[in-house]
Image: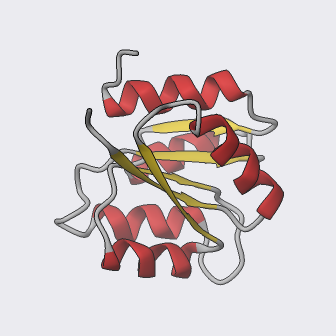
Amino acid sequence: MSTYKILIVEDSPTMRQLIVFALKRIRGLTIVEANDGVDGLKKLSADRFDLILTDINMPIMDGLKLVSLVRNDPNYKAVPIVIITTEGASEDRERALALGANDYITKPIQTTQILDVAKRLLNITI
């Protein structure tokens, strides 16, 4: 059975918990949490990840800056990134996708939405 590592970058502990809870339904996942973009980058430099889920609005470094830095790193160019945010405006979505995000989910999130996106981006067919 293959295992996947997922990085969740979100400054709200409650939101992180919700995302972790949703993803735990997929067997074989290792989930690592970061509380802002800088923390996320540190964790990315120390380990390999198969999927990144990030918020946009965070202190120190926001999710869009994180997406652009990750996309400029040859080691992470191909790693799927999902934005999970309260920013529902179409220009925010377009900007995130233009920077290299693979998907964009607006809060409030549904567990099934997170699961569907994660399975699709990781090619999990279960």
Q: How is the image coloured?
A: secondary structure
Quarter of the image where the C terminus is located: top left
**Residue extending furthest toward the left:** 74
Q: Quadrant of residue 14?
A: bottom right
- For the point 44% across and 44% down, the residue is 29
Is 63 in front, or is 47?
47
Q: Percent position (x, y) of residue 86?
A: 78, 46
- For the point 35% across and 16% down, the residue is 125
- For the point 71% across and 37% down, the residue is 106
- For the point 58% across and 38% down, the residue is 23
Query: How many marks on residues?
Result: 0
- Look at the picture and state if 40 lies above or below 101: below
- Look at the picture and state if 116 lies above or below 79: above
Is 41 in front, or is 17?
17
Residue 46 as seen in the image, left or right of residue 6: left
**Residue extending furthest toward the top:** 126
Residue 59 as seen in the image, left or right of residue 33: right
Q: Percent position (x, y) of residue 60?
A: 65, 84
Q: Percent position (x, y) of residue 94?
A: 53, 41
- Look at the picture and state if 113 lies above or below 15: above
Residue 16 as seen in the image, left or right of residue 5: right
Quarter of the image where the N terminus is located: top left
- Look at the picture and state if 36 lies above or below 55: below
